[in-house]
Image (cartoon, helix red, strand yellow):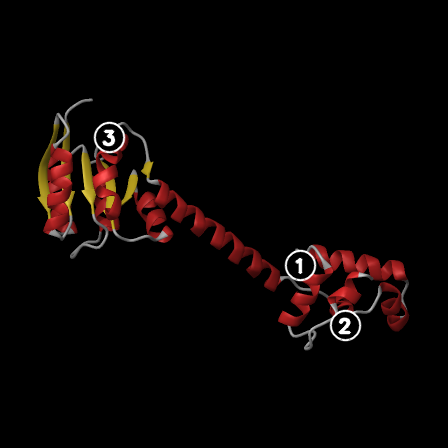
Amino acid sequence: MKRLRILIADDHGLVRRGARTVLRSRRGWRVVGEAANGREALHKAIKLKPDVAILDISMPEMDGIEATREILNAVPDSKVLVLTMHESDQLVRRALEAGASGYLLKSDLTDCLAKAVKAIAEGKRFLTPRVSEIVLDGFLRKRSEHRHGERRRTRITPREIEIVRLLAEGKSNKEIAAQLRITVRTVETHRAKIMLKLGLHSVADLIHYAIKEGLYQAVGSAQSAASA
């Protein structure tokens, strides 16, 4: 691998020292500069033009996200590796959106720093398994929140609300049809449309929805409703 020029930016001297020790053990790699805050990191990156800049996120004067953006604007050929203690899917996303090629937790510094630097120097992205897990968990959580939000925003008609309430009370399709003076087939059609609109998969789900939305105050008879 070609010789690498590396810049380390972190407001904790102990972290910089640990990173420097790991990196200097690699043949041909050279730590050309260090910075204790984001603004200093930007100035040194412009002056030194490192192949790889390792940036902490929580730095004074200019945080690592903004420093990443500014460094890559000023030195487009540089690659940025974020090295931080923050286990946040939002920060990972923001760092990558700013142009960072990798995101590494400080707890993984000894085991993964050299691998991360090598990968991004070769034009690859680098996320440890733990960071990938954080990103995936965040994605799944947001998708679940989105689905629940969509369900809450879904509008059902007054007649559909009435049918939901009766189903939650344990009424059969036939009993609902008689009470509302409509055909059993119409009740079945309404019921299918309600389930589709709300993204529900069973009558038990529908009962939970009715209770949550205040359409049915007591705990309904799921077994009676399920037999409808």
Q: Amino acid at mark 2?
A: Glu
Q: Is residue 208 left or right of residue 172?
A: left
The residue to which callout 1 is attached is 198
Q: Is residue 161 visible?
A: yes
Choose mark 3 or mark 1, whichever is in front. Answer: 3
Dot 1: within a 10 Å radius of its alpha carbon, few (fewer than 14), some, or many (20 or more) residues? Answer: many
Dot 3: within a 10 Å radius of its alpha carbon, few (fewer than 14), some, or many (20 or more) residues? Answer: some
Compared with 90, 112 (above or below) is above
Choose mark 1 or mark 2, whichever is in front. Answer: 2
Task: For mark 1, give the secondary structure.
Answer: helix
Q: Could you tell me residue 191's position as x and y percent?
A: 78, 60
Name which residue lies at 16% across and 50% down.
38
Label 3 to label 2, Cα distance in Å?
63 Å
The residue to which callout 2 is attached is 169
- Asked if the residue under mark 2 is in contact with the one under mark 3, i.e. CB atoms within 8 Å, the reply is no
Quarter-wise, where is residue 78 in the image? top left
